[in-house]
Amino acid sequence: MPNAIVVPERATRLIHVLFAIQLVSMGAMEMSGPFWPLHLKALSTSAFEFAFAGIAVYVGPMLGIMLTSAFWGRVGDRTGHKLMMVRALIGLSLTQLALAWATDVWTVLALRCMQGACAGYIAPAQTYGVGIVAPSRRARLFAYLQVSTNLGSLLGAVCGGLILDHATFFWINFIAACLCLGCAIAVMAILPNVHVRKTAGIASCEPVRPGSTIGASIWRSSPLPGLLGIVGILLVSRMITQTPFSLYVSSTFSVGNWVVGLCYGMLSLGFAVSASLWARYFEQRALVASLVRMTWIALGCAVLAVLAALTRNVGVFVAIHFIWGVLLGATTPVLMSLISKASSGMRQGYVLGIAQSTTQLASVAGIALGGWLGEGAGLPYTYAFVAVSYTVAAGVIAMLRRARGMTTDGRASAIDDSVRIAREADAPAEAQ
């Protein structure tokens, strides 16, 4: 299909299509997510093999995405991000189909690593959306797509459990493969190719060429490295509880597994409820104003972590996780929007690919750090470590604000104003 230019009214409908496709595809992948340890325990031949596989089955895809997201982003900048979405969904479908027939631990782990390397759907979907919405609405776009991911995770886990109650693990992977293939067909049939207008770099009016000195200056003179660092440390803080969570809740509150699942799901629920509202709140604010508020949000998360560490009432613990999820709705979507606005228009795929790699690296680091701290210091201190990590994150945000020469009263520096004006001048796609 030749490239099409999308009118604003149609762009809104296409974003809803992206939401539905991401919900189904991410839900398909999460159908197996909570149940890999059960499957691997049946396949493992030793306790060591099971212990290693139980971590590697989750870390493997993250490493694959981390190592390849920037590469696929560059390819998407040249060939179009619709093609990259189709490639990722077909990769997910084929690897899930292969996993359905995998009968030993090491084959499963190899396929999971390959799945991450070949897939990476979220970054091209975000970049495609950036190409069809106004720059001022990017925060809302990222929030909307992340709500889709969170809802997909919730629905996928429930559906996977229902399938496993009535059938074997084979059918979870087989159905997931069919759903991902259906999503790939939907992308090919419904979504048009779109032009992404090439905007000027921050320090130049010329298009940024990969490998050029102008491209390097974008990283030196822009807030991109700092914003990526903030995304990373906030995700590390969030993921510290991933490994010890179920053990902490069970041992601290002596509750059943369904309550553990409820506590875990409260984060996603709070995120889904608040992300779009936070996006609207932040979308008209300059970078400095956003960073000032992000500092307070990080400190709020630290306070909630302290309260979670102190409470022995499971009802209070559930409420804390819901509020924590509400605050998390203001973090990654807003920061991804700021990263997108600070990057060159013709390098959206590459920059968002780097951001995706950063999130995966941070998730791996958080999972590993949480497991190590849980074993070394003990489960009762889990949320104390989370509070410390969020406090460090707040300090990093404050350092970035000072490094950019910004004031805390909400006024941007001259360079921030120029970047904002240039980005706002970059219309999405023109009316057909």
Image: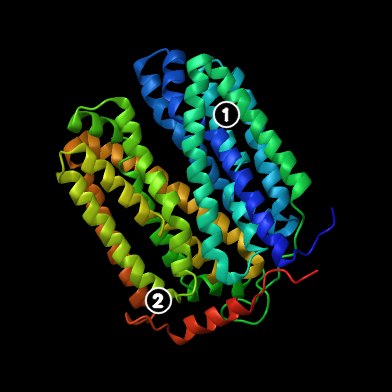
- Residue at the image position 65 percent from the left and 35 percent from the top: 180
* Dot placed on the residue nearer the N-terminal end, 1 or 2: 1
Vertically, is 7 above or below 266? below
Does residue 301 show up?
yes
Indicate the position of residue 379 as horizontal and vertical percent values: 20, 36
Q: Is residue 285 left or right of residue 115?
A: left
How many numbered marks are there?
2
Q: Position of residue 275 (x, y in %)?
A: 45, 56
Q: Which residue type carries mark 2?
A: Val
The C terminus - image quarter: bottom right
**Residue 43 shown left or right of residue 294 in the figure:** right
Q: Residues within 10 Å of mark 2 (few under 14, many from 20)?
A: many
| Residue 21, placed above or below residue 50 | below
Asked if 48 appears above or below 431 in the picture, the reply is above
Q: Residue at x 52, y 40 (%)?
A: 152
Mark 1–mark 2 distance (CA, rounded to whole Å) = 43 Å
Q: Position of residue 57 (x, y in %)?
A: 46, 30
Disc 1: CA contacts within 10 A as few (<14), some (14-19) or many (>=20): many
Q: Which residue was labeled with disc 2?
A: 288
Toward which corner of the image does residue 86 lie, by quadrant? Answer: top right
In the picture as drawn, the residue positioned furthest to the right comes out as 2
Viewer-nearest residue: 344 or 110: 344
Q: Amino acid at mark 1?
A: Leu
Tell me the residue at 42%/12% (across/down).
45
Instruction: Tell which of 110 and 135 is nearer to you.
Output: 135
Closer to viewer: mark 1 or mark 2: 2
Task: Return the mark for residue 332.
Answer: none
The residue drawn where x is 54% and y is 41% is 64
The picture places residue 1, in percent across and down from the top left corner, at 84, 52
Q: Which residue is mark 1?
A: 111
Kindly state the secondary structure of the residue where label 2 is placed: helix
Determine the secondary structure under disc 1: helix
